[in-house]
Amino acid sequence: MTELVLGPLLRHVGERTATVWVETDRPCTVEVLGASSPTFTVHGHHYALVEIDGLEPGSQTPYQVLLDGQVAWPEPGERSLPDSVIHTRRDGGPVRLAFGSCRRSPDPRGEHGPDALSAYAHRLAEGSGQWPTALLMIGDQVYADELGEEIREFIRRRRGTDSEPVDELADFEEYTYLYRLAWRTDPAVRWLLSTVPTYTIFDDHDVRDDWNTSYTWREQMWALPWWRRRITGGLGSYWIYQHLGNMSPEERAADELYARVRAADGDAGEIVDEFAERADKEPDKARWSYTRDFGGTRLVMVDSRCARLLTPDRRAMLDDAEHQWLREQCRGGVDHLLLASSLPYLLPRAIHNAENWNEAMAGGAWGRAGARLGEKVRQAADLEHWAAFDASFRSVAGDVLAVARQERGPAPASIAFLSGDVHYSYLARVTAPDSGATPISQVVCSPLRNPLQGRFRLANVLACRRGMAWAFRGLAALARVPKPPLRWRLTRGPWFDNMIATIEVDGRTSRVRWEAAADGTTLTERGTADLSA
């Protein structure tokens, strides 16, 4: 009998449509609510996305997954969790977007603390929480270079202990096993992903720590004999396991790569590998960013990793095509504008100034010796956020301020950046220059499960304190970096717990709530804020 390897995952959901993603152990036909799709094959693995249409807006529809006509989900004997249900959207009602990042899974020894995503799943399963419109996973869904014992054992059985890369994933096959561990091991999380629409964007650990830090970093990685298999495996698996489900049915229908993979005579692994290598070497040839509208709320998911422009002469967070695309999305005429980037746009000011200074130093502001030292510090200290791409930071600031000042249509009631990555949570508010009547905020929620420890935690605690920014601002000024075009300060946090946050939108009002995982099944509120005030 054909079986599910992974899934079902409920992905893009509209007013009348829904997409269910699965991986199966052999080729088959997958059916959900009368809609069906044959599987396609990539490197010996079998996948399908079932497009469901004709649902009623605002409805709740339980579903099963059939493989070649046999019920495969819910799995036989597993009745401890509720049925998987598709909740379709209806314009006009409240919008709730849960989000977080940085989740280590599995964690059988409890080294990384309670899982906020699992606790959130338990609360929904018990019927004690308000149902989310969607779940946003903003980076580091898997850790390809910080491996747990389960994936290490798989690698030992497959290629021994000495083959390169040591203690890291090598290729597509190992990525597939890591996704299986992350999304199947915990029954509550597996159920959650089957019944809450999920949208994702990658960060560095989905591929490798410090991915695309600089031109020098890229040169160093491509000089390694094993890197090609690693990057094609990372981006190819991301396209299948995460990106395909981010698309709407109309976007998938128009996607040339998806059509080629589905039409392939046999295994489409080479097609996906060619795309993945091209996407890494020529970032303007692929777009991982996307937008979604939830009533009057516009969500823009921004790729701040693969879309980077890194050449000997130019350095930008986004290549020219991607930046133009983002500029076109930064428009008014909506109630709320949410810009989701795995990397925080507004860091604590001390860290922002340090990254400003380091970029200038690595760029030669203090000579060749200073540039070499700056590059070493950049890679060692992970100084590669928006602040380390100062020209890009300033450009996005101009776009956001133009929206807030009604230069691109009626101003939203709020503009908020949603981010993760840094392994602590906080709220920052823009205080100057005048942005009109629209408040601009940075909302960070990280990690879901992977808390910051030791000296790194202490360093960030100190960086969040008032008065710490001036020393690094002085160094940046000496490197001839002008002052940032915005002023901001932290008003909530930092919190260093494993957490999940929820943006709650009702008309022109937008609020955020952070909740910490008290244990594996319970969440405790840590803070709230009105983003529209």
Image (cartoon, grey):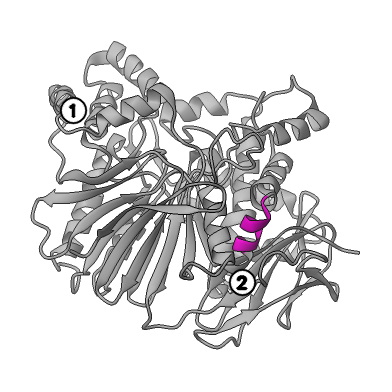
Name the residue: 79% across, 24% down: 160
The percent coordinates of residue 407 (x first, y second) are: 15, 67
Q: Is residue 400 above or below residue 484?
A: below
- Left or right relative to 313: residue 281: right
Nearest the viewer among 220 and 455 is 455
The answer, for residue 287, to whether it is visible in the render is: no
Residues in magenta?
186-193
Local secondary structure at mark 2? strand
Local secondary structure at mark 1? loop
Name the residue: 21% across, 36% down: 349
The percent coordinates of residue 164 (x first, y second) are: 69, 24
In which quarter of the view is residue 48 placed? bottom right
In which quarter of the view is residue 446 placed? top left
Looking at the rendered structure, the kind of residue marked 2 is: Thr
- Left or right relative to 115: residue 30: right
Name the residue: 17% across, 57% down: 401
The percent coordinates of residue 417 (x first, y second) are: 31, 54
- The residues tagged by marks 2 and 1 sit, at their Cα atoms, a distance apart of 48 Å
The percent coordinates of residue 492 (x first, y second) are: 25, 47
> Which residue is identified by label 1?
468
Nearest the viewer among 334 and 153 is 153
Q: Is residue 129 magenta?
A: no
> Which residue is identified by label 2?
19
Mark sitting earlier along the chain (2/1): 2
